[in-house]
Amino acid sequence: MPSEDIFERISSSYYGLTAAEKKVADYVMIHQGKTQYFSISELAEACGVAEATISRFVKRLACKGYNAFRLAVANAAAARGTGNPLSGEVLAEDSIPDMCQKVFSADLAAMEETLSLIRPEAIAAAGRLLDGADKVLCMGQGGSMVMAQEAAHLFSTAFSKYFAVTDSHMQAVAAAQLSPGDVVLYFSYSGSTRDLIQAASLVHRRRAKLILITRFPKSPGAAMADVVLQCGANETPIQQGSVAARVAMIFVLDILFSEVCRKDIESCRARRRLVSDALAEKHL
């Protein structure tokens, strides 16, 4: 890949671009700090072009794909002082109280944005699927797998049918043996990973159901899900696995858990009491 940054490459390539590609170039150059947060569908919509135009544009810039382009934009923006790899725009010269306030504000903003994105009908639909499921497999990759494990742990305090499947190979094995009454609860910030697409294909083949928690409702994975629950929190490619994104996901998870439990709150309370009594023996 050329050594010049992505914005220099756009400038040097500009007059060789098509009219549609120039619209993308103009948008990216004007919104240097903003572009890095967009999915390919969001950037296409913002520029008023097709996703195929975005794909051709990033190839002209010698990027292997859209994610490589986003990373190049994030790196160039950071080098120019318009991007920051830390949550809440934490700076080296900040005091510890200032840093704490910035991180708090970033995490709070992630929850507030998530709240604004919640669709009650989607929460209700996901709750019905989980409530009626014979078995629920919780999956994800990387930082999102941590969320899947948290989901399995949380739901297991009240229900016995939730299981985390952590290894990508075992996820394929488990998905290949699903039954029509089973549900997969999948966590993916991008909604655009190969593992998610493979799992979704297997879920459909087995006539099971897929609930996806993601930032991008127009992603390839979201298009294959039966229910999509959107979380807030923007993160750049150099903020992979940001805490704010996880806060947003765990907020959605807490809402979903509450929705399922309130369908039979007395039984839920009784089961949680049994779990609490069993765990009490673990303490000194």
Image (cartoon, rainbow, N blue to C red):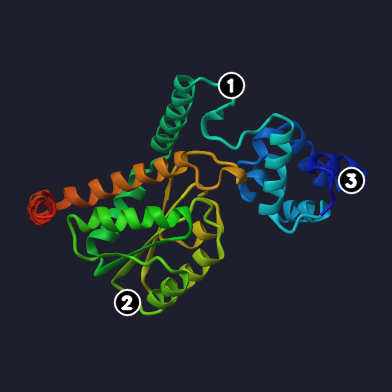
Q: Residue at x 32, y 74 (%)?
A: 180
Residue 206, visible in the rendered structure: no
x, y (%) of residue 71?
Answer: 68, 47
Measure how far apart labels 3 and 1 are at the Cα level. Answer: 37 Å
Tell me: residue 32, above or below residue 246. Answer: above
- Amino acid type at circle 3 is Ser
Does residue 77 appear left or right of residue 259 in this picture?
right
Tell me: residue 139, above or below residue 201. Answer: above
Does residue 213 appear left or right of residue 17 in this picture?
left
Q: Residue at x 79, y 36 (%)?
A: 26
The mark that comes first in sequence, 3 or 1, is 3
Q: Quadrant of residue 139?
A: bottom left
Measure how far apart labels 3 and 2 are at the Cα level. Answer: 52 Å
Q: Which residue is mark 3?
A: 13
x, y (%) of residue 163?
Answer: 29, 65
Residue 179 is tagged as: 2
